[in-house]
Image (tube, grey):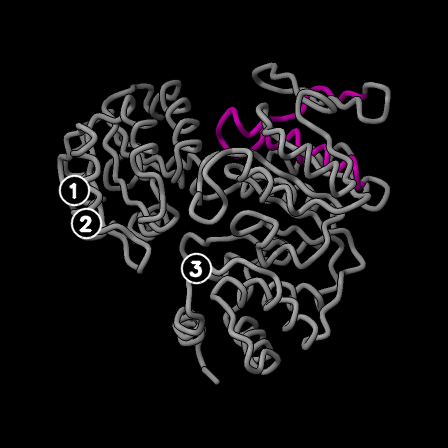
C-alpha cells in the first residue's frame, strides 16, 4: 500500500476517528485474522504512571546479559519510531515495519485501528516469528483497556500510581490504580514496585485471583551507597542478595524499579534462570535515554544538559528531588535553565509546581502535533501560575539555542515536559 515507513505512519494517524480510543475488541479481531496466539515463552507486562519504561529497560538488559532472546515493546519513542520494537536490543528496521503493517492492513479488512493499535499489532506479529525466550511489553496508557492487554502476562508489574491521563483513566488514584491493575491475570503473580499503593490494586488482585507481591512487604532493597542489597520473603523465608551494582539509569527511584524487576526475575527463575554474573552485568549496563540523561555539549564544555521525559506531577517531583542533590560534571551547581514543552492533555500546573523550586529560568517551546500546546498557550499557563517566562520559542531547536546562549559557565540546561521535547533536543544536540 505504501513504500516508506513515513507514509505508513502518516496514514495511520488519520485512519481512526480518535487518536486515543481505549478498548481491546478491535485488536482482538485483527489478531484472530492474523492467527496470532498467546506465546509459549514467558510474557512480562508493565503498567504504571512512572517507571514502567525503566522497568522494561532493566528487564531487557538483564535477560540479554544472560543470553536470552528478548523482544521489547515500549512507547512512545524519542527520536525514531523504530525504537518501539526491539529484538535483542536492536531496533526493528523500516522494511520489517512496512512488511508488518502491510500484513496488518490486509487482515483488518474494515476494522479501524488507532496509531497505537497498529504499533502494538506490529510488535506482536514481529515477536511471534522471532523465536524469542521472553516478551517484555510496556503498556501505552492505563492497562485494562490498553491494546497490549490482549496478551496474557505471566508476570505483571505495576511500577507506580500517580495522576496522569485522568480524562481516560479517572480523577483519583484509586480509579487509576484499578485501570493499571487490569493487566493482572488469574493464578499469575503481580508485582507492585512503589512505596505507596492504592487499595484498588489489592482489590483487583483479589477479584482476579492474582498473587500480589508488594515493595517493602514481600520484597525490597537496602541502599548502601556504592552498592545495594535485594531481599524477598515471598517464599516464606527471607532471601537476600548483597553487593549489587547500582543500575545504569540515574536516580534513587531506580532502586525501587530494580527491586521490582528482580522480584519478577525470581518469579520466572525456573523458566529463565539468571546467574549472578549476568545479573550484575545487566544492572550495570542498562541505559535509557531521556531519564536524567546527562550530556556535556561540545559547544559548551562547562554547561551540562540534563534531559528527562518527566511530564506529570509525579515524575516532575522525582526529577526535582534529583536535581537538588546533583552537581554538574565540573563540580559546580549554577543556575538551572529549563527548556519546557508539554502536551495539552497533561497537568501543566501540577508539573510546573513540582519543578519551580529548582528552576531559575523558563524557556517554553511549542511542540508539533494535535495534542501539543503552542509556545504561547504554555507561556500563558506558566504566567497564570505566577512564574516569569524568560523566552518563548516556536520549536525545541530554537529553544535549545536560546538556552545555550543564556547559559554561563557552571549552569545546567534542563529539557523536560514531554518525550517530544526531549527527543527533539537529542536530535538538536547530535546535529
Q: Residue at x 63, y 26 (%)?
A: 245
Tag 1, which secondary structure? Answer: helix
Residue corresponding to mark 3: 80
Q: Sort mark 2 into few (<14), some (14-19) or many (20+) by Cα contacts within 10 Å.
A: some
Image position of 420 with respect to 130: above or below: above
Q: 295 or 147, which is in the foreground?
A: 147
Give the magenta part as a residue range. 239-268
* First in sequence: mark 2 vs mark 3: 3
Q: Is residue 263 above or below residue 145?
A: above
Determine whether label 2 and label 3 are within 8 Å by CB: no
Q: Is residue 43 above or below residue 238?
A: below
Q: Nearer the viewer, residue 329 or 143?
A: 143
| Tag 2 and tag 1, C-beta contact below 8 Å | yes
The residue to which callout 1 is attached is: 402
Quadrant location, the C terminus = bottom left
Q: Would you say 204 lies left or right of 162 here?
A: right
Cα–Cα gap, marks 2 and 1: 6 Å
Amino acid at each position: 500500500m505504501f513504500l516508506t515507513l513515513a507514509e505508513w505512519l502518516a496514514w495511520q494517524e488519520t485512519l481512526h476517528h480518535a487518536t486515543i480510543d481505549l478498548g481491546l475488541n478491535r485488536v482482538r479481531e485483527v489478531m484472530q485474522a492474523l492467527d496470532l496466539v498467546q506465546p509459549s515463552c514467558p510474557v512480562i507486562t508493565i503498567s504504571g504512571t512512572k517507571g514502567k519504561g525503566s522497568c522494561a529497560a532493566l528487564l531487557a538488559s538483564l535477560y540479554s546479559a544472560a543470553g536470552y532472546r528478548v523482544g521489547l515493546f515500549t512507547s512512545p519513542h524519542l527520536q525514531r519510531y523504530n525504537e518501539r520494537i526491539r529484538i535483542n536490543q536492536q531496533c526493528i528496521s523500516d522494511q520489517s515495519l512496512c512488511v508488518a503493517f502491510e500484513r496488518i492492513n490486509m487482515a483488518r479488512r474494515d476494522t479501524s485501528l488507532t496509531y497505537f493499535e497498529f504499533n502494538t499489532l506490529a510488535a506482536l506479529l514481529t515477536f511471534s516469528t522471532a523465536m524469542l525466550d521472553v516478551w517484555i511489553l510496556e503498556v501505552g496508557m492505563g492497562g485494562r483497556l490498553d491494546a497490549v492487554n490482549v496478551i496474557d502476562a505471566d508476570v505483571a508489574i505495576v511500577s507506580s500510581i500517580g495522576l496522569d491521563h485522568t480524562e481516560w483513566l479517572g480523577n483519583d488514584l484509586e480509579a487509576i490504580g484499578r485501570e493499571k491493575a487490569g493487566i493482572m491475570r488469574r493464578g499469575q503473580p503481580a508485582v507492585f514496585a512503589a512505596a505507596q499503593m492504592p487499595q484498588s490494586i489489592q482489590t483487583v488482585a483479589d477479584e482476579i485471583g492474582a498473587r500480589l507481591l508488594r515493595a517493602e512487604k514481600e520484597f525490597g532493597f537496602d541502599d548502601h551507597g556504592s552498592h545495594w542489597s535485594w531481599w524477598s520473603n515471598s517464599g516464606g523465608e527471607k532471601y537476600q542478595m548483597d553487593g549489587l551494582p547500582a543500575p545504569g539509569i540515574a536516580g534513587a527511584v531506580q532502586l525501587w524499579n530494580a527491586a521490582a524487576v528482580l522480584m519478577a526475575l525470581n518469579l520466572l527463575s525456573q523458566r529463565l534462570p539468571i546467574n549472578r554474573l549476568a545479573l550484575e552485568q545487566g544492572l550495570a549496563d542498562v541505559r535509557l535515554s531521556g531519564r536524567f540523561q546527562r550530556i556535556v555539549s561540545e559547544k559548551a564544555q562547562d554547561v551540562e544538559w540534563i534531559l528527562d521525559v518527566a511530564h506529570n506531577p509525579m515524575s516532575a517531583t522525582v526529577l526535582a528531588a534529583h536535581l537538588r542533590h546533583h552537581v554538574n560534571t565540573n563540580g559546580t551547581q549554577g543556575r538551572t535553565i529549563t527548556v519546557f514543552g508539554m502536551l495539552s492533555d497533561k497537568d501543566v500546573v501540577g508539573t510546573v509546581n513540582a519543578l519551580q523550586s529548582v528552576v531559575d529560568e523558563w524557556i517554553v517551546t511549542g511542540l508539533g502535533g494535535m495534542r501539543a500546546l503552542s509556545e504561547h498557550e504554555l507561556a500563558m499557563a506558566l504566567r497564570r501560575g505566577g512564574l516569569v517566562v524568560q523566552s518563548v520559542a516556536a520549536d525545541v531547536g530554537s529553544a535549545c539555542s536560546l538556552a545555550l546562549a543564556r547559559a554561563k559557565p557552571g549552569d545546567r540546561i534542563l529539557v523536560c515536559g514531554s518525550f517530544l521535547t526531549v527527543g527533539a533536543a537529542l536530535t538538536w544536540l547530535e546535529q
